[in-house]
Amino acid sequence: MHKPGDVILGGIFRIHFFPAYPDLSFTSEPQQPDCYGFDVIGFRLAQSMAFAIDEINRNSNLLPNVTLGYSLYDNCVQLGTGFRVALTLVSGQEKQVTMEERCLGTPPVLGIVGDSASSNSIAISTVLGLYRVPMVSYFSTCSCLSDRQKYPSFFRTIPSDAFQVNAMIQILKHFGWTWAGLIVSGDEYGVHVARSFRSDLGPADGVCLAYTESLPWDDDPAQLRRIVNVVKKSTARVVIVFAHESRLVTLMKEVLRQNVTGLQWMASEAWTSGTSLQTPHLMPYLGGTLGIAIRRGEMPGLRDFLLQIRPVLNYTISGNSIVNRFWEHAFQCSFASPSVGWVKAGGELCTGQEVLENVETEFLDVSDLRPEYNVYKAVYALAYALDDILQCEPGRGPFSNNTCAHLERLEPWQLMYYLEKVNFTTTFGDQVSFDDNGDVLPIYDIMNWVWLPDGTTNVQRVGEVKRSAFKGEELTLDEDKIFWNFESKQPPRSVCSESCPPGTRMARKKGEPVCCFDCVPCSEGKISNTTDSMECTSCTEDFWSSPQRDQCVPKRTEFLSYHEPLGICLTTTSLLGTFICVVVLGIFIHHRSTPIVRANNSELSFLLLVSLKLCFLCSLLFIGRPRPWTCQLRHAAFGISFVLCVSCILVKTMVVLAVFRASKPGGESSLKWFGAVQQRGTVLVLTSVQAAICTVWLVSASPVPHKNTQYHSDKIVYECAVGSIVGFAVLLGYIGLLAVLSCLLAFLARNLPDSFNEAKLITFSMLIFCAVWVAFVPAYISSPGKYADAVEVFAILASSFGLLVALFGPKCYIILLRPERNTKKAIMGRGIDT
């Protein structure tokens, strides 16, 4: 199809489905290749270019005083044919053509609109790029064509597959489909799509491909069976297909044969609008398909333009034979000229007067213009670039010495320069401009195949995905309009592994994609409070993980409490010991005039009972929540109370030895060193030493409450840190020194003659005392947490009871049960008073 003009634009379209391969050898006369299988949509694309040029020529504001013409060719879906067409369009560039002369033949073109297939555009642009002839494609989406080094003069008004892949990924993420299969055509288009998916999908996206399969070019049945088997066995419920409609027909036949249902198909723009797949027998499988479609546009006046088409009965203009073929296809008739080799045998004759409006043909359906709109934008882009050339002011041009390009001597590379900077808005409201790679601002419609109850199919728009200069990529979906071909009428789930709930983390399966993982519970002390957490986070020092491992809760605090059974028992025992001391003290006060009470300094006995009572009471400081004052007081009170107690015992022992020594000849002088004053002074001095030790300890390194997390990870043990181990050791060592000394002295006096020798009782009580505290040290060191306090309380109570029972048990026995022995004679061993 040709139309003369001041500037000629070329166009390459698919007007026939199938090529008839001619003899291309050089031994015979070259022949124009013939084609068959008329493509109405391809013919409408070509007419869309003619319409755009006609509209531009009628626009006085765009390219005034310049008429655009066109040369449109059919590529017959054959790379070789398309390549020859492109060379035909650009041939003759070496001949200078001036506008002043009336030249015969078709002038060379300055730009080409086409081709449709990516593989064709790759081959053609490789050659055209050498001469910087601009080529604006309306349908080639391969991302490889964005390589400006290889294809410097290639432009397109359709988004590249790189954006289409990204749009697919956004849809997958929107519906939570993290596990999908990918089927691509076995050509450059499919290879680059698969490469884009692999490069764009990362751990941050959370989407993985279960498989990637390539459709065979020769429709090998064995290969198709293998691919469908892979799809059938995979756990992925979403299948993405990037292939041309013709390649998908054979695949769906195998899907139908194996009855593979329950899949959510996602279509690339190459087959989203494929009517050959929208058949009743395929809808149980393809119903609900979500697809990426070229942006729908509006071209007012196109239908009226198409209705003006008329066949030409004079075949001297061979280029118009395409219109005649369309006429035969539309009206199922034949032109009777014998010079045409493709006249059909039989049937009605075409008169050329038939009315297009009376025939049902999709050729006139302009309600869903998509690739046509891309053609329209491509023509206008070239027109605006030419218009910018005309607007150039002399001396301010972009070329050497600030020169402008002239239409009469215009070179293709000059047009390409302006095409790179073109920026306009269509009447439909879409902005058209090209980036550094020759790609247009991307925008796609999202389509959904609705399977209607009557068995028909409606392809409806349910959203869009686009990229703007200011907002970046945006996905808009109207989910209420989407038809889902499942019983639930809801989106399917397509995941390799189910989401990991809070309290667990994702652990990748070795050798499998990142979407395939196990859910591993968080370890103790760590939590995850989000779904699909990659790591478990540790709780802070005072917190611990909940049983569900989904939140940090305050650690349970542990100390020797008054409310627990152990604390209750120890408290009861301590109070019992205190009560017994009070009772014994009352008994001694009541019988203070009796010989057994008065013997061996009754004052020391009273002081000893008081100190024992303090020993019992000081154990209560070890029970309950540790506080600064209890931590400081507990060991000081314990140390001083026990030193007071042991000091009294030591002095009593020394008095026993002195008394018996004084009973021997020459020993009277020893008693003068053990009078009442000396006894009190000795107790005071010995106790003051312990008080001094405690003071130095508390001042230098005072015990303080301490939260210990070393014993148990899940709880805090409240304890009193001793502050200074040396101070604590000195305190215990001083008590032990006095106890050992008392034990030794009492042991020496155990065999002294007396019916009531108190040294024996002191010896026994000190043995109990020393045994308890010797056992205390290793038990205290090895006991964790509150049990260390319990061991210390137990040692205090045991030693206190040992002293109380050993020292005062026999005396109370005599006072209360054997009063006849509570006489001076009985005590001195001279018999029992009657």
Image (tube, grey):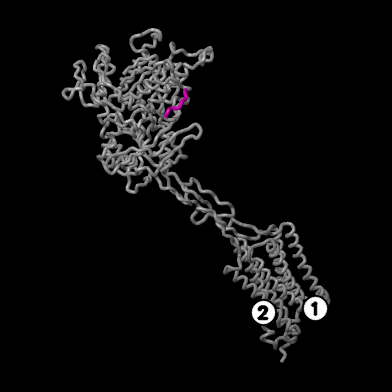
How far is mark 2 from mark 1, CA to CA? Answer: 28 Å
Q: Where is residue 477, by image quadrant?
A: top left
Q: Which residue is mark 1?
A: 662
Task: Using the image as rendered, state which of residue 308 and residue 444 is in the foreground.
Answer: 308
Badge 2 marks a residue whose secondary structure is helix
The mark that comes first in sequence, 2 or 1, is 1
- Amino acid of disc 2: Gly
In the displayed structure image, the side of residue 299 where residue 832 appears, left or right: right
Give the residue drawn at x 25%, y 34%.
221
In the image, 793: left or right of 665?
Answer: left
The image's mark for residue 809 is: 2
Q: In the rendered structure, which amino acid carries the disc numbered 1?
A: Ala
Q: Along the line of sight, which residue is nearer the eye, 661 or 203?
A: 203
721 vs 757, nearest the viewer: 721
Instruction: Name which quarter of the figure residue 508 lies in.
Output: top left
Which part of the image, by quadrant, shows the C terminus?
bottom right
Task: Answer yes or no: is residue 513 visible.
Answer: no
Q: Does residue 30 lie above or below 277 as drawn?
A: above
Residue closest to the eye, 455 or 284: 455
